[in-house]
Image: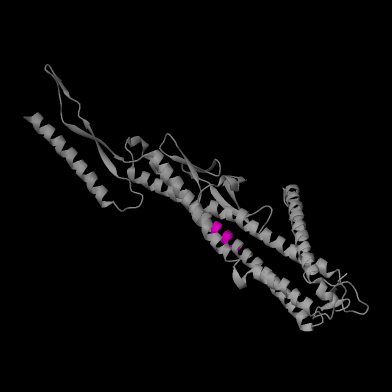
Amino acid sequence: MSALMSIGKTAMFASYAALQTTSNNIANANTPGYSRQQTQLADAAGQFTGSGFFGKGVDVTSVTRAYDKYLTNQAVSASSTASADAARLDKLTQLEGVFPTGDSGLGSAAGAFINSFVDLSNNPSDSSARQVVLSQAQNLASRFSAASDQLASLQTGVTQDVKTQVDSLNSLAKQVATLNSQIANLKGSNQPPNQLLDQRDQLISKIADIVNVTTVAADDGSVGVFVGGGQSLVLGGNANTVKAVPDTFDPSKVMLTMVEGSATRQIPPDSLVGGSLAGLMKFQNEDLTSASNLLGQMATAISGAVNEQQALGLDLGQPASAGAPIFSVGAPRVLAASGKHRHSHLERDRQRRVQSAGQRLFAELRRHQLQVDAQLRQHHGRQFLHSGESGRGAWWSTA
């Protein structure tokens, strides 16, 4: 009779434990990061008799999480990729606003400037037509300057966003290191600390939203967190520090480094394939850099072609001299860095592309000049384009 009562008691305790676990699951149904828990039951050790082994009820062995490592890693990876795309999309949307279409765009200003020469060619002696050309030139220069300022402002915003994300990353890493220590201390209990494990998984997911991570489990229950192609962010109860510092080649940009004790190593941008930091760095190093380079190439090509054509004529001075440039372009800069030779090679390649673009634009302007050449000839000789401010200008020769 006592054996039956003992078996009934174990069944009641097991059912109570299962109900308690189920109630806890229901209570935390909307808790972020909570993993559904299960009560693990096992047949109690039987009692041997001459007639065989008789069962002694049921035992509650553990309460475990409904957890799948593969699915968790896939979810973290997908979230990290989405975070990178969202960060880059936000900045690309802002970059798109720098180059609007319609009358407020660079293309419209450049077109108006070129078209003003058509009106001038119809009446070269009209001083107002000359002034319109100079006014359109000033408008075009202002558009280029405004676009350049907006790109610089975008870079400042990227730098600030990167620093903010890095601060959050370091804070999360320290919290993971603390949880690693707590989990390792409970290893001897032979029972999983489900709440702490959930908290650590949630923190790692937040880290992955900032930068892609790889995790490696240790025997003591702690988890190593690695970023940037294998650089350790968290090892056991220790967390290293990520810093955002000025770029080696361009101080206006930012790059990421990992501080490990007394050693500081750069995190290669190509190793960041997920997280908001990856999106921001990709935007800075590819999208924004490309936009800045193309804007500079366009300004250099237009100004170089126009100034070269302008120099073919004479001004209104006595005696006349070669036409003064309409546009001016800032002098090139050389930035000192450890990778100077590679940077110089890239700069020479950029200059070749700019020169090629300038030659193509000059050919287009020359073709346009030849089209209006017949109209210029009717004025019998040289016509002058007055500069307005200095009293000097340049003429377009019909020869």
**Res. 207 visible in picture:** no
Coordinates of residue 44 in the picture (x, y in percent): 20, 29
- 131 or 397: nearer the eye? 397
Residue at image point 44% right, 49% down: 79
- 307 or 241: nearer the eye? 307
Residue 162 magenta: yes
Quarter placement of the C terminus: bottom right
Coordinates of residue 325 in the picture (x, y in percent): 81, 70
Residue 221 occupies which quadrant of the picture? Answer: top left
Coordinates of residue 76 in the picture (x, y in percent): 43, 46
Q: Is 391 positioned to the left or the right of 185 in the image?
A: right
Residue 221 magenta: no
Residue at image point 69% right, 53% down: 249
Residue 187 occupies which quadrant of the picture? Answer: top left
Specify the principal SS of the magenta part: helix
- Extreme right residue here? 319
Name above or below for residue 326 compared with residue 342.
Answer: below
Q: Which contiguous range is marked in magenta?
A: 156-163
- Extreme top residue here? 50
Name above or below for residue 52 compared with residue 126.
Answer: above
Residue at image point 62% right, 73% down: 103
Coordinates of residue 225 in the picture (x, y in percent): 48, 43
Q: Is 245 positioned to the left or the right of 66 in the image?
A: right
Q: Is 350 positioned to the left or the right of 11 in the image?
A: right
Q: Is 187 positioned to the left or the right of 112 in the image?
A: left
Residue 1 occupies which quadrant of the picture? Answer: top left
